[in-house]
Amino acid sequence: MKISSAVFSISSPNYKKCPSDGRPEYAFIGRSNVGKSSLINMLTGVKGLAKTSGRPGKTQLINHFLINNEWYLVDLPGYGYARTSRTSREKWSTMMRDYFLHREALTNVYVLIDSRIPPQKIDLEFITFLGTHGVPLSIVFTKSDKESQREVQANIKAMKKELSEMWEELPPMFLTSSLTGMGRDALLDNIESINETLK
């Protein structure tokens, strides 16, 4: 897929305020500081489209970006940032749960996982939540250029082993690097192929 246009559409506090035009939505989410904004900018080829920050918890709303005037890339708030208040975490939990369970336009969720570290409980719990509720998902390993490939592959293998204990069939997985562009074509082709099935 070639990205010819990528523009910000709207930031919404809940799923009911999201666009109502019915275009398919592909959501990106992960633990705080997993490299989500950098990945979105790499995918779209638009520097600064999603705001990057060294401060976890930067994204607070459901952000829609219209791609090629055909589908939405949705930038969701990261999870697992311990320095936010309990009230904020509960508000996030309600907003995200409602979005995942009630947003009819949601077509696939790309769960971002830091490839530099072993499987984290919070990631496994989130993936399990999506799977339990039948929400289509893929796993995107980020920052694959930051560590040796031996360590990266060991962490991916460990993730597969953890998921295999709960899943009969593992979700699609992609290895990416926002720095080198690794995985860009594979992810965009995946979205394109899903779009084709919707026509």
Image (cartoon, rainbow, N blue to C red):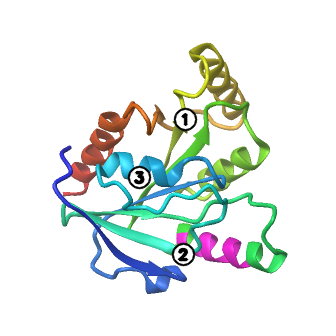
Residue drawn 45% across the image and 71% down it: 63
User: Contact, CB < 8 Å: mark 1 with mark 3?
Assistant: no
Residue drawn 52% across the image and 56% down it: 135
Q: Which residue bears the numbered disc 2?
A: 61
Going by the numbered disc 1, the residue's amino acid type is: Lys
Q: Which mark is residue 143?
A: 1
The disc, 2 or 1, on the residue closer to the chain's N-terminal end is 2
Q: Nearer the viewer, residue 162 or 122?
A: 122
| Quadrant of the image occupied by residue 18 | bottom left
Along the horizontal axis of the image, is 102 left or right of 194? right
The disc, 1 or 3, on the residue closer to the chain's N-terminal end is 3
| Total marks in image | 3
Q: Main secondary structure of the magenta part?
A: helix
Q: Which residue bears the numbered disc 3?
A: 40
Along the horizontal axis of the image, is 150 left or right of 125? left
Magenta part of the chain: 91-99
Q: Residues within 10 Å of mark 1 (few under 14, many from 20)?
A: many
